[in-house]
Amino acid sequence: MTGATSKGPRWALWLPLIVFAAFVVLVLFGLFRPADREVQSAMIGKPLPEFALEPAVAERPGLSSADFRGEGPRLLNVFASWCIPCRIEAPQLDALSKAGVEIHGVAIRDTREDVEDFLSQYGNPFARIGKDDLSEVQLGIGSSGVPETFVVDANGIIRYQHIGVIRAEDMDLIMAELRKAGA
């Protein structure tokens, strides 16, 4: 036998380098290609599903889909007392409420006492708060977690969904979406 057959084809020596180079190109493409970070809810442009929730706390009425029909757009905020990010967005919700925005809340899998403690500690910007123990309304409106906030127009149509905490830098966007929903 000759030594040429034991070496195999010469291109096989370059195969690991070719595979590595292809991997680097793929990673660089992923890093520099602008990603679409906006999540499009399937519920945008659709009416709120019909619901009627019991009050989550004694000092606020419960919440129903009918509460979103009438004058002007409103916010629907899905929150929970056990949600750490919900505490972070509390000052922004308070500021929106003080600016005249009507905010309704849906408390997810919570007890009356825990919601009352949460609101006494972090403020209560809500005109109404419904209790959603089984997350039926939460899932029905396309929410996958807490906190999430929806802009709902005067016809009860969902116009915008904000996933996660409303931070100070999100306030202009939320106000703009409310204005669009009221136009």
Image (spheres, helix red, strand yellow):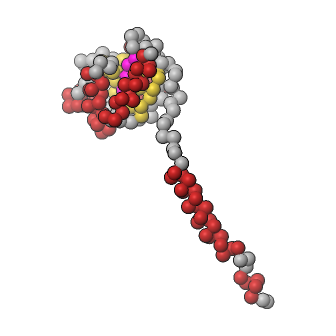
Residue 77 appears in view: yes
Number of labels in the image equals 0
Image height of 55 relative to 135, above or below:
above
Where residue 76 sits: x, y (%)? 38, 23
Residue 144 colored magenta? no
The quarter holding residue 26 reads bottom right
Looking at the image, which residue is at 59% across and 64% down?
A: 21
Judged from this view, the residue extending furthest toward the top is 70
Which residues lie in the magenta part? 73-77
Instruction: Quadrant for the N terminus, please.
Output: bottom right
Looking at the image, which residue is at 76% across and 83% down?
A: 5
Where residue 50 sits: x, y (%)? 47, 17
The quarter holding residue 66 reads top left
Q: Is residue 6 left or right of residue 64?
A: right
Q: Return the residue nearer the eye: 160 or 106.
A: 160
Where residue 153 sits: x, y (%)? 44, 17
